[in-house]
Image (spheres, helix red, strand yellow):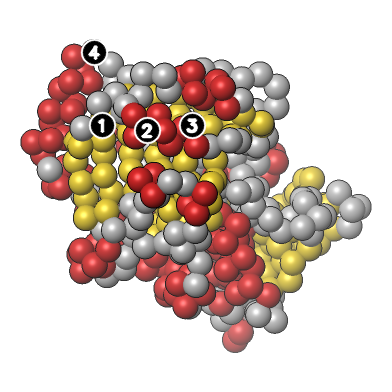
């Protein structure tokens, strides 16, 4: 049977390639850039997705590069007052069967890439963007910017929030800015004074802003993200604009001393305008015919639930499972056109299994943005509720304990 074709070599594309190739498929991955790389930033991996990564056999490689934060703490950005704490570490592992991790995106990329490169049935094609595709009853054909073409069993669009595959498949416009800006930085903890170093995730909540900080790369680096209200102009699809350190410091002028000291310690920032789509409304936004969308191509989301990468990995896991259970990855059925004809039905089953969960995560992330940035009496009520609600308010069994 013809290979599965994947457009996009980021976290979603590599995880799809790994999951499907491990399940027995031949997979061809096409990436736009000459090299497979991720921009420097941190990501959080909840136990829901760490279980998936462990099932893919990545546990040992992850342990070499991740950080294991011991708790998630919320604090008032203006006063420094603690608002709530969720214990992570062994508590999270006992509740959900896997730990809560933080990792540098580049390290996550390398772990996936190294795993894919060990698979003889996975082939990687850098500098080969998919520019268009066409479908027929039994196959999909992709056309590359290199003027080459390739037939496949199905196409997975994993080419990010500004997906060219989605544009042709659904033609539903581009993601829209929500008026929030993210200033991102990574700083060596060895360069920080002792009182600013951290082994935990800290979320500082303030009026129309919040700050998230956590360790990555075995605690060697501290990832810091400042989210404020505002807009930028130019190419919104580019997420590595240079940020102005003085602008960030001005925005944080009313911050409490510990937070203010942290902001002053960061010399360089990267600026990212947050863009999203309306939360998914139907399975038809995940797939059509023998083309499926995963990750940000299907459901871009704001980072206020720390589940963007996780949902891409979950998509990959479920897609591979559905295809395997449907028999299209079985070597005994590789030559049957009947099996190939089943692909659209299987992709629809994948979409039905995923879209509601992805929509819920998108919606909850947007809601968190409103809660995090509350002002006036609503902000005071939020603070009081968090302090009274304790750990039970911060834990999320529906998210971390879900069976895929």
Compute the Cα span from label 3 to label 4.
Answer: 27 Å
Label 2 close to label 1 by CB (< 8 Å)? yes
Label 1 close to label 4 by CB (< 8 Å)? no
Q: Find disc 4 in the rendering and name its residue.
A: 376
Label 4 close to label 2 by CB (< 8 Å)? no
Compute the Cα span from label 1 to label 4.
Answer: 17 Å
Q: Residue at x 19, y 41 (%)?
A: 84
Q: Earlier in the sequence, mark 1 or mark 4?
A: 1
Q: Earlier in the sequence, mark 2 or mark 1?
A: 1
Q: Find disc 1 in the rendering and name its residue.
A: 80
Residue 349 on image: x %, y %: 45, 58
Dot 4 alpha-carbon crowd within 10 angstroms: few under 14, some 14 to 19, many 20 or more: few
- Asked whether, in this view, residue 90 is left or right of residue 208, the answer is left
Compute the Cα span from label 4 to label 2.
Answer: 21 Å
Looking at the figure, which quarter contains the N terminus? bottom right
Between 15 and 189, the one nearer to me in the picture: 189
């Amino acid at each position: 049977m013809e290979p599965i074709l994947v457009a996009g070599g980021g976290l979603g594309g590599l995880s799809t390639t790994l999951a499907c190739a491990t399940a027995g498929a031949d997979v061809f991955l096409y990436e736009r850039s000459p090299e497979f790389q991720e921009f420097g930033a941190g990501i959080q991996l909840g136990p829901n997705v760490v279980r998936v990564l462990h099932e893919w056999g990545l546990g040992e490689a992850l342990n070499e590069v991740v950080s294991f934060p011991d708790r998630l703490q919320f604090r008032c950005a203006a006063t420094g007052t603690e608002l709530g704490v969720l214990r992570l570490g062994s508590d999270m592992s006992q509740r959900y069967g896997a730990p809560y991790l933080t990792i540098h995106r580049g390290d996550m990329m390398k772990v996936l890439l190294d795993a894919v490169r060990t698979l003889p049935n996975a082939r990687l094609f850098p500098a080969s963007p998919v520019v268009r595709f066409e479908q027929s009853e039994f196959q999909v054909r992709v056309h590359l910017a290199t003027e080459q073409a390739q037939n496949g069993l199905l196409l997975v669009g994993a080419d990010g929030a500004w997906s060219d595959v989605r544009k042709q498949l659904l033609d539903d416009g581009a993601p829209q800015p929500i008026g929030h800006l993210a200033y991102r930085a990574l700083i060596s903890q060895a360069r920080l004074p002792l009182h600013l170093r951290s082994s935990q995730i800290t979320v500082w909540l303030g009026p129309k802003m919040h700050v998230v900080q956590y360790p990555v790369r075995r605690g060697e680096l501290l990832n810091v993200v400042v989210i404020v209200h505002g807009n930028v102009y130019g190419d919104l699809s580019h997420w590595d604009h240079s940020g102005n350190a003085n602008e960030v410091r001005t925005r944080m002028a009313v911050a409490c001393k510990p937070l203010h000291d942290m902001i002053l310690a960061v010399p360089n920032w990267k600026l990212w305008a947050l863009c999203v789509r309306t939360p998914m409304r139907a399975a038809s936004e995940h797939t059509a015919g023998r083309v499926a969308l995963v990750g940000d191509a299907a459901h871009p989301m704001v980072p206020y639930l720390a589940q963007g990468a996780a949902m891409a990995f979950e998509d990959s896991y479920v897609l591979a499972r559905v295809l395997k259970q449907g028999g299209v990855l079985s070597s005994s059925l590789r030559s049957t056109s009947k099996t190939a004809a089943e692909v659209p039905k299987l992709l629809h089953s994948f979409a039905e299994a995923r879209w509601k969960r992805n929509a819920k995560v998108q919606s909850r992330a947007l809601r968190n943005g409103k809660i995090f940035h509350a002002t006036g009496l609503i902000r005071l009520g939020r603070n009081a509720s968090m302090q009274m609600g304790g750990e039970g308010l911060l834990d999320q069994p529906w998210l971390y304990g879900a069976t895929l």
